[in-house]
Each structure stands twice: as C-alpha cells, then as structure tokens.
Image (cartoon, helix red, strand yellow):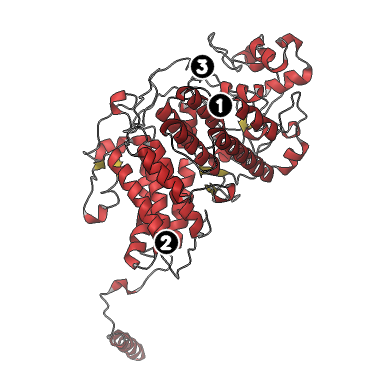
Amino acid sequence: MKMIRKRFLSYLMAVAMIFSVGSCDLLELDINTDPNNPSTASLSLLLTNAQVNLASTFAGGLNNMAHGFMGITSSTDDFDMTNNTWNGTWNGLYSGPLTDLERLIEAAEAQGNNPRYLGIGRVLKAYYFSLMVDLWGDVPYSEAFKGSAGIKEPKYDTDSEIYADLLNLIDQAIANFAESSAITVVGDVMYSGSIPAWNRAAHSLKLKLLIQTRRVNPTAAADIQAVITADSYIKTAAQDFQFRFSRLQNPDNRHPWYQNGYAGGEAGFSYFGHQYMFEMLNNRDPRTPYYFKRQTTQVLDPADPSEKQTIPCSQRDDCIYSYFVANPTITNAIFGVNPDGLTSSQRSFLAGWFGRDRSDPSGIPNDNPLRTTVGAYPAAGLFDDVAELGGNNKGSGDGIFPMITSWMVKFYLAEAMITLGVTVPAETQTSLLQKALTEQLAKVVSVGTAADPAGVAAGGPWPITYKTSAAFVAEVVAGYPAAGNENQKLQYLMKQAWFANFGNGFEIYNAFRRTGFPNDIQSPLQIPRQFALRLPYAQDELNLNRKTPTVVYDSPADAIFWDVIKFQF
C-alpha cells in the first residue's frame, strides 16, 4: 500500500511539472539555441575565416601550379591536367571561404549601417573572383551561393561580365570607405581594420584589373590615368595588400610552401626550375639565398647505379641545365672553370642546386632530402646557410602571400606608360623600375630576416659573393632599354617581374598571357598538352551542373577574354 501511494505521488508531481511549464509552447523546439552552433556567424568571424582560408588555398597548390606554368617550379609544368586535377580545390572554395565572403557581404548590407565591413568584403570578393576568372574564365557568380533560394545549378556568368561587375564592386567599396561609421572592424587579420589601407588596396586592385584588360578595353588609358590622378593607390611596403600566415601548428596555419618544404619530415616541395635558379646565381642576385635553401653538399656519382637515376635529367639527353655540378656550361658561367676544375667548396655549393629542367618527364626518385627547397622568403623557411643544411622543422612558417604590393603597382604603372602612354607624376619608366626592385628586395630581406635571423646573420660562407641590393638594382636599371621599342621594353620589364613576383605565381602567369613576355623561358622538354590558357572545370561540376560549359583548357578558342595573345609553343 505504501508503494502504491509513493508511485501515485510521483505521478502527481510529474503532471504538476508539465502544467508548471504550460505557459511555454513545448512544440517550439527552437527556443533552445546551442551557443556552439550559431545559426549565423558574426561578421568578424566570417571575415577572419574568409581571409585565412582564401589565402591558404590560393597561396598553396594553385600558386605552385602558376609558378610551374612559368618554369619556376615543376608543378604541372607539362600542362597535363584533367577535370579531377582541381576538383577538390574548386569545391572547397565554393563551399567554404567564398561562401563566407558572400555571407559577410549579405549581412553587412542587411544591417544598413555597416559600410566598413561591406567595403572590405567587396574588395576581397573582387580580388579573389578576379583570380577565379583569370584561372577558369566563366564561373558561377551571380547565381552562386543561392542554394537556399532553390538554385541548385547556378549559371556560369561570362568572364568579361564578371570583370565588369568586379570593377563596379570596387567602386562601391571605395564609396563605402568614404562613409562614416561608428562600427570598428574586428577580425581583420590583414589590415587590422584600417580603412585608409583598405581604400588604397581597392584603388590598386582597380588598377590591376584595368592593366589586365587593357588590350580589350578601348578606354583603358583614360581609366588608368583616372586611378593615377586619384592618387590613392599603394605606394609603400607598409601599405601592401598581403596576407601573413602565422606560426600556429595546430591547426597548421603556416605558409603552405613551408608546410610542404619543412613540416612533413623530408622536404615534400616540388622541384624548382633550373633556369630560374641558374640565372639568379649567375646574376649574383642578392635574393638568391632568401628564395632557395640547399639541402645537400653531396655530389652524386653517375658511375654508381644507386645514384645515377637520382641525378637531375639522368634519363634525358636534351637538358640545358641538367646537373649543375657536372655541366661545364654551368660551371664555366658561374666559376669560370670546367667541372674537374672546381674547388671542393665550389663543388659542394653547386651540388645543392638540385632541381629540374622545364617539363623533364623523368621519373621521380627518392630525392626529397636532396632537392633545393623553399627558403626564408616568402614562406619563412630557412636562409641558405650552410650550417643549417637539412634543417627540417626549422624556420617559423609565418611567411606572406603578396597579393598586391607597392612593387607590383609600380610594374603596372611602368607597363601602362610603355603600352598606353599614360603619365605618372614625377616618375619615369626607369624610376618606377628602380623603386619596384628596391622595395621588393627590402621586403625579401625583411621577411627573410624575421624568419631566420641567425642564418641571415651568419650568411654563407659561399664560394660566390652576391651583390648588394643597391648595386644589383643599379645594374638592372642601367640595362633598361630606354631607347628600345615597346616589345624590347616589355621583355625587360616582365623578366624583372618574373623574378620579383616570386611567391605570387598568378601575377607572373597573367603577365605572360597578357604581354607574351618574358619570352626567353626554357622550352619544355616535352609537352603532353599545349600551354595552359586556363584551368579545366571540376569533374563534380560537369557531373552535377548541366550549365557547366564545355571547354578545352589549352585551346586558343577557349582562352580568357582578356588574353588576345593565346600563346602556343
């Protein structure tokens, strides 16, 4: 009886509890919000996420590929790609950081009083979608990110239409930055919320896109002159539009090149191009020990079967550069002697310059510990100090992705002066070249010294003496063909941009497609496919979106709209 009474009381208490919450609608299950799973992210979080993930994606594999197209690395340097090559990258961009960026813009617009976040979002969108167009041409744009509105197969806007809208987006951003706002930008890991800095980035991006399209834009000269007259573009290194990676290892937010070159045990970075390294060595370019890190002093023996197949270009007889230490053309150019006349220090030094001739189809041996790897700039690895050979898991990794810099802007202006006849107050073509090189070398030294101060302080000892920055710049400027024709000037200018824009392969790849220069890059040893004029679309897009265009990435008929050269080997 006592047990029955106890159960009855428990039942009454349960009923009472139900009625005690009767004022709440028990069917409204969304009243409980999980703070760890917000339905909408804050603007600061969206901004940080977009900046970090976009930079990580574009500074990594895509960037390496663009360098490979231009003979600087071996990544995709034979231009042989399929629709699966960039499938994951494409999907990751649209499902991740590009979506974050779109949500940032939508939220800032909806608030109606947030011009600073809105302007920043628009500048970032204009920059990264211009790269999307430069790489893929027509892409989903106006109907992208509208799955919630029922658009499951977004249309592909034409590349020229997207560029036109991006220029409009930049103008809107500039107008946003001119508005007053009490809201402080938080989460900006690029400019720390500085609106004047973002305003300069916007004007510089506009200049970049106008230069990019100058051959298909009849008003290019006037449009560029207007940007120059506004006088709000990037002029100093302190104003550079760049992303700096962190030293954080978990999650790993270090420079993608650093991760490949140092963080994974034996260096996993692709080969550097022999021509690029040789010319910098031969020129005694002071950037050389910052760009590259030798890993070995061992001279391989071609008579030893276990080493023969590891020697660069051992399976070809048509290499130009081949194995530096055994190539008399190389040894005579750098040291003035044949291979058998090298001193032991000269021999050990050249053994470390271990890369590939352009598009060498030989197999890839287990030579990770021998390859020249990434240095102190831009990836914040190690300076080329002999005492630190084989220094895996060293350096800091907090390198930079130089997006639009003071020196890039000066290259744009010099190109515009050469091709369009625009004027830049108090500047000449040679003064712009001099300042561009001086500023870029200073950035190389700054980033490289911060990454590996001990290595930079020790320096060498090397059996060659690199020129000082001032002497090197003076020599390059003195060689500028001031009395030459347009092509001679562009060839000289773009060759210097080829060296200076190391770390941003898109600048180099775009400049080549736009100008046809530099035209003295080593011809590929083999070309399974023609020069890549764009990238192939993702296989998932072809499978799931019936609006995906059918294109051939190395066909002149399918080149990007601003590419009037349509280069073919």
Residues at circles 1 and 2 in contact by the CB criterion of under 8 Å: no
Q: CA distance from mark 3 to mark 1?
A: 12 Å
When the figure is inspected, residue 519 is found, relative to residue 102, above or below; the finding is above
- Report x, y in % for residue 419: 43, 31
Which of the two discs, 2 and 3, sits closer to the camera? 2
Query: Which three-letter amino acid code belongs to the residue tagged 1?
Result: Tyr
Residue lying at 26% horizontally and 52% vertically, measured from the top left: 147
Q: Nearer the viewer, mark 1 or mark 2?
A: 2
Pick the front one: 350 or 304: 350
- At numbered mark 3, what does the secondary structure look like: helix, strand or loop? loop
- Residue occupying image coordinates x 54% and y 26%: 482
Residue at mark 1:
271
Q: Report the front residue among 333 and 226.
A: 226
Mark 1 vs mark 2, CA separation in Å: 47 Å
Q: Position of residue 161 (x, y in %)?
A: 28, 42
Which residue, given by chain and number where applicable, does mark 3 sit on?
362
Which mark is on residue 178? Answer: 2
Left or right of residue 352: residue 515:
left
Residue 516 in sight here: yes
The amino acid type found where label 3 is placed reads Ser
- The disc, 2 or 3, on the residue closer to the chain's N-terminal end is 2
CA separation in Å, label 2 and label 3: 57 Å
Q: Quadrant of residue 295?
A: top right
Image quarter of the N terminus: bottom left
**Sequence-wise first label, 3 or 1:** 1
What amino acid does circle 2 point to? Ala
- Give the quarter of the image for residue 164: top left
